[in-house]
Image (spheres, rainbow, N blue to C red):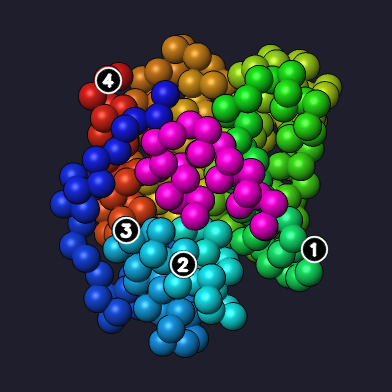
Amino acid sequence: MMTQVNLEEVKALFTPLSESRLIELWPRLHAGDCEPLPQTPQLTAAWLLFHNGDFQRCAEVANALPDGQSLRLKALATYAHYLETDSDQKVALFKEIASISEQIVKNDPSQFNAYYQIAYNLGRYGQFISVTKALAEGIAGKIQTALTACLRLAPEHADAHTAQGTYAAEIIGKLGKLAAKLTYAVSADEAIEHYRKAVKLAPFSISAKTEYADGIIALHGKKQLKQAVAMYQEAVANPPADALEALDYYIAQRELAEA
């Protein structure tokens, strides 16, 4: 169950970024998605809206920019996952973002973050539907294809490695290790390898560590609960630097409190 987010409490967890501070922190904040530093003042200003937590306004501004579509997708997906409270609307947003992303890569196959957004949003969508429906819609295959394309174009995309680990862990958690291996060619070792690579590539990423912890539970159940809790504790060891880190920090703290 997704933690209900109080945005005002989240915003209290970090200091709003200035443009100069955003540029300084860019390598840390974008170790996950490998986004290049923006080359125009307009795109920089739009990214500043994102990092300071104004996701809906960010999506609107980014949509009007010729170089803003990757940002638009990320802002919409972040809003949908963390802040949209209506389940039907959340699911509709995930499907819409995935569809927009599919059109983008059809027009320009070099857009690695659009491939990532296909996988991310289909994965989130899949969490709201039955296994039977997911199988009928070929969700797993579409996610794997998109992640493979993303990592081929951007091998150090930490978020895609996290998603690849979660993809494998969730399939194993639902089908069991043998069926997952035979049907989808995934293994627990593969999942852990991707999680570890993500944490190495993006050591400040809270989501890389919390997804890793959740993956441990999916793969091993309560037998490795202590290891999962330790990973959550590591995730909140450093204060968040922007709104997205603050969202993950906020949720991780509450998950820890309930552990």
**Neighbourhood count class around disc 3 (C-alpha, 10 Å): few under 14, some 14–19, many 20 upward:** many
Q: Give me the disc on residue 147.
A: none
Cβ–Cβ below 8 Å for labels 1 and 3?
Answer: no
x and y percentages locating residue 137 in the rendered image: 78, 32
Viewed as shown, does residue 189 lie left or right of 234? right
Q: Is residue 48 above or below residue 201?
A: below
Tag 2: amino acid: Glu
Residue at coordinates 16% horizontally, 52% vertically from top-left?
Answer: 12
| Residue ID for mark 1 | 106
Tag 3: amino acid: Gly
| Residue ID for mark 3 | 53
Figure quadrant of residue 53: bottom left
Task: Farthest residue to the right: give it.
Answer: 182
Q: Tell me if residue 131 can be seen.
A: yes
Query: Mark 3 or mark 2, which is nearer the start of the sequence?
Result: 3
| Overall secondary structure of the magenta section | helix
Tag 4: amino acid: Glu
The stretch of residues the image draws in magenta is 76-100
